[in-house]
Image (cartoon, rainbow, N blue to C red):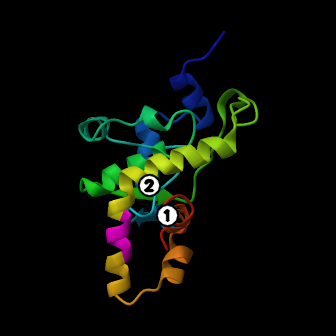
Amino acid sequence: MQKSPGELFCIFSNGRSINEFAYTVMHTATVSTEQLLCPPDCVGSSCVVIDKDYVNSIGGVVDYDYFPYSGDDVDLCWRIGCSGGKVLRSGSVYIHHFEHGSIIDSKLDFHKSIIENNQRLFERWGSRLSEFIQEELKKGNSIDELKTNFWLIRLFLDYKTQFKGEN
């Protein structure tokens, strides 16, 4: 008999309800929890606790422009951050890929998907990322520091060089 997502969640969260799990993340996993600056940072949303009404007010969880893989979680974090919301990352989570769902199992052309979805992401958010970079340079930070501290800034600058011919 197939189990519902709620039943599977209960099994893999040691019997906790979603509300109990959210409480644990917010109140007991705080040692390794940090607020992210979004953009340029993000969290891979393998396991998320969100306010459904809030996220729906900024366009919903999934943006199908990024289908089949990559970019939608970054876009969600950046929409949350730009609308005044907070994105927190906890280092104390367990990730389980249900039913062995993975890139390999789905025979996804990972490389092609990443390139196409990064193009979508950077076309949508490029001006905001460029503004962030300029603000940080005015504060005395270097491009190398930004690339080291924010891996998506490095990807964005590489994208601009490779696809836009900009330096």
Q: Which residues are magenta?
A: 129-133
Where disc 2 sits, the SS reads helix
Instruction: Please give the name of the residue rendered at 62% of the width and 35% of the height, measured from the top-left corner.
Output: 12
Name the element at disc 1.
helix
Camera-nearest residue between 10 and 127: 127
* Disc 1 + disc 2, Cβ < 8 Å: yes
Residue 167 on the magenta span: no
Q: Earlier in the sequence, mark 1 or mark 2?
A: 2
How far is the residue under mark 1 from the one under mark 2?
9 Å
Disc 2 designates what residue? 122
Badge 1: how crowded within 10 Å, few (<14), some, or many (20+)? some
Rendered residue at 46%/86% (across/down): 142
Q: Residue 42's x, y, as percent?
A: 46, 57
Q: Label 1 sits on what residue type?
A: Lys
Q: Is residue 50 above or below residue 26?
A: above
Is 62 in front, or is 108? 108
| Mark 2 residue type | Phe
Q: In terms of image quadrants, where is residue 148?
A: bottom right
Q: Position of residue 73 (x, y in %)?
A: 47, 46
**Label 1: which residue?**
160
